[in-house]
Amino acid sequence: MDPSPILSPILGKITRSYTRRPLLDPNPTIPAPPAASSLYRADQSTWTPPPATQPRLRARAQTVEDKLAAKFAAMDEFLLNSPFDSVGDFLAILFFNRPHGESDPRGSTHAAAVACFLRGRTKIRMSDVLPLMYQHRCSYPSKDSIHLHERELMFCTTGDASTIHHARPFISTWATRLVAAEARKQIGRTTTDDSDDPDFRVQLRACTNGRGKAAAHVVTWRDFRNFGIKTLAERFLVKLALPMFLTKYMSAPMKRGVFIERKQRPYPMVQVAALSSFIVSRNRYATGYMAMLLGIWHFVCKSHVDVKRVYCRFGNAVADSTARDALRSMTAADIKEMQADTLDANDRGETEHCLLLDNVQEYDRVYEPGLGRQSRLKVGTAGTKVKLQGCAPGAFSATDYYTRVARNERKTMTVRSLIDDIDWDHDKICSLFRSTPIAKRRMPADHSPTQCQPLMVNSERETESQGMLRAVEDFDRQIGVDVERNPNLLSWIRGDGASYAQILRLSRYTAPIGNFRNKIATPEVWHTGATDLNSIAENHYGPATSSDPSSLSKASTCAGLKRPSNLKSCDYYPTVRSLTLIWTAHVLDCWRVFYGTEDLIEYFDGLEKANKLPNLDAILTTATTLVDRYTSQAALQNSLRASDATSIGNPNPVPVGSPWVARGGSGSLVDGSESKLHQEHAGFTGDRVLRNSEIFLLEFGWWNEMAWAVPEGDIGRVWEIFKIWIFKFAGSSHQNYMKYLLEFYCLLRYESSKGLHDAILDNLLLRVKDELIKYKPADLHQEHYNKWLQEMSRRHGGEFDESFFRQIISPNVDHFLRFKKEMETAFNLVRRGKSHTSPHQRPELRLLLSMFKEEEIHLFRQGRSMGHAAVNQFSRGVRQLEEGKLHDFIDSTTCLGDFFAAICGSVREDSPEPDNSPTLSPSNSDNDTDSVRADSPASSLSRADSPTPSSSGSEDSSASQSSSASSKASVASAELDPADPNEPENDGIDMSDEPRFSGSFNDMYIDDEMGLQINNNDEEEEEAGEEENEEEEDCDEEPDPANEDCEENEL
């Protein structure tokens, strides 16, 4: 009988192997006696065994078939003669399990045999028997069975399993329910916090009433710092081994028995997401895995409310109301921690923060107006606490500051001292490899990324004195500033022009009665640069239909660029892009003229083919020559008179072009809003077009130098440009910024210790990343925060001082900006490019180069003037400061020093100690303000008085003379030109405090993630808001810090 294939593995275990002794050979070969060996053959048998007379004592070896047949026979005999009713009765008795606490009725042999079997100590174990039962052909209903319906009960999850007759459906059902019970048990254990893992919180409460015996853990931003799918999957593998195993088989694709983790939807991520929702379904407070995180993520992404509701119903995320409560709790935790840090620093006698503030506004348009429902401009003030780094002990000592202010050393400031204090000689501030020694003053390399904590916004008007006072007091309470606790500490406040002016005004007006005298203020970099950009646009665009190739209007028309609709407040980024292109074309055309070629690109291609390309030293030497020829004050002066331009004494003259013939109708048609065309006086022999281009190269070169220094962290170079802009703003219509920068200069030069001087400069820019060349102006960073507030204002409505903005939005803006990026990292998503790269401008550049070549714009053409005249604002600023503006500034700003002198008891006449002075004293022999006019830079500053480019072949004359050409060439290489008799008159209107309309740099941003220009209001909203803005004009204007009487009644 053939054994069943199913029993073959078992038969191999139950068949014993025997080793039999070898039987004797029945015909052995017997060797012959030695004597008769020759008569017998060795291989011939001569013995015949006798017949067997005894029976065999050992049975013949049994085969497997014989053994199996014997056991089957024994089984039949056992079942026939067994006292058990059935096999089931036998198995029930065999595996009898006595109740706990009762005596065992089984015999010792019975108990020992079952114990050995169940404990796996026998050769045949349960792993062999149970598959036999499950796979037996009789365990499954046949098609003729009366229980055919039990085929559908395989892995049945409902009903009473004891009613199932066949073994296979029952075993599968029983196993299913056993596994389900264990999975439920494991899920239940993960719904509460584990004492063995105290760093991970399962139950994150959005808020708590504090009435519980043990206060529940309320969510904070710190709970999300270490979130990661991989970390969460590893935690689940330990605590949820069975559910992870089941979900892995359900979600993971398999190929040839091996699980495959796909890139698009990796199965561990799917498992974690599913199990997280399972846990939340079991316990609504167990939101620490993913539910709370995704709920806040939906809020940050501004998901539609219906999307939030659906995902909440799935158990993937908490409700939107819960997310808002959580954000309120996070705000409270951050504010509490911030106040504790501030108090700790105050107790140590240090100031470790500064306050950055800016106005925030949004035009609230009402589509169904009525009583109390009118379109209006909502305004508020947003602030940010910025953590300071690298401050020397005692840097913010108020006593030292009072003493220095009381000296009123700003009275010794002259125009000459201002010019001499500019580091014109620092030629190495740019280089091919931006190393630290070459930079003027780089931000400290050991600084970590700047920590910024946005504060709760309010609805105060920062442009009003009372509004600014209340706003600063609100921010101080949030930060934890307590002047009475340590009155010898200064607080640093930063802001744009309007904010800066109001802080200066309050510090002077409230010094005798309040704590505002402990405040120092500085203007911000980005708004100052944006104001200078507006000044350049006003000076160089000219009439809209100008035919002058040196005007930006003509260049924009040639290149197809858009001319700003409002030159007093330009769209920042489009204007920068246009001016950079035009400035680059001017620079390249200067190089083309120098090499005397028709096409600069073809010229250098030819040199490359001939292997005659100039080396770096030759390029730098040429650059120095071009700087002196086109962007120096001597060049500007020479372009006004043919005698100077073509004089033999001119060491670096501009090449002479073709004779100028005035074109008929060259005067451009302008509308009534445009200024009249410039008309030269009789006998003009200069080249106005050449001079315009030279002024543009000079002024935008300064702006470019500042723009490139900021991301590199070269704050020293930014500060030098600021000192140059003092004169430039003095000669422009932005007079208030001249006063702001002068006040900033006096603070650093005369009123700061070395520690305070270094602390301000070393923290003036924000380090946004650990990498080099990752710095940002602080006010631009605040504008990115404001974008969130304004966008949420459009979606939510309401005032800025409502709970939604103060407790949910504004304090968490910095977290919002980083949260989406962190979520991408947590889910192993490749960073998506969120910026739209600008298209190249090579065709526009070629058009501009062609026009400049045809117009010979960088060649001297005697008598050329085409109706546009740019102003040399630097030279005019020097003259106006000399003529009394500096004297007026000093007279109007010494009141605070006089007050401090009074409260200090006496005025100290001695200067700061040399070791404590933040900067070297300028070489200035004039100690009184009257010497400003006696020793005028406009009349005495000559080539001998100022540093000139070196012509030697050393490092100092090559690499050191190329990069900072724009800044050094303003005064260093030539005499300041006297007043141009044909120069347009200054309109005398200060445009630096114009209210910012839609599209200005105050209301337009570049999305940090998408790189898109975003305007807050469309054209219709701008038109609707013009009337409101006109009404708000008096409030939005930046006040003149010199005017001390305009708000006496208010205060």
Image (cartoon, grey):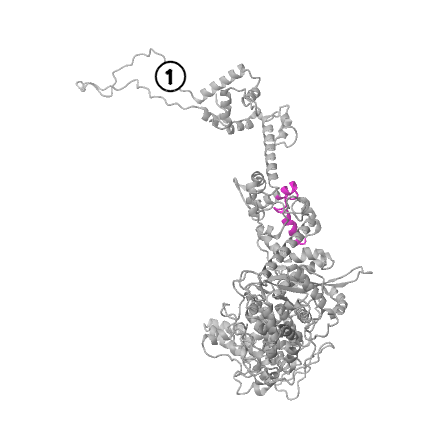
Read off the residue under disc 1: 58
Q: Which residues are magenta?
A: 276-302
Q: With respect to residue 952, does 463 lie above or below?
A: above
**Residue 588 x/y as whole percent:** 56, 74
- Name, please, the residue furthest toward the right: 371
Taking depth in this image into account, of 918 and 792 the one nearest to the observer is: 918
Decide whether the magenta segment is chiefly helix, strand or loop. helix
- Asked which quadrant contains residue 546, the reply is bottom right
Q: Is residue 298 magenta-colored?
A: yes
Q: Tag 1, which secondary structure?
A: loop
**Residue 362 x/y as whole percent:** 72, 62
Q: With respect to residue 763, does 541 lie above or below?
A: below
- Name, please, the residue furthest toward the left: 35
Is any atom of residue 253 visible in this view? no
At label 1, the amino acid type is Arg
Is any atom of residue 685 visible in this view? yes
Q: With respect to residue 439, does 221 lie above or below?
A: above
- Asked which quadrant contains residue 415, the reply is bottom right
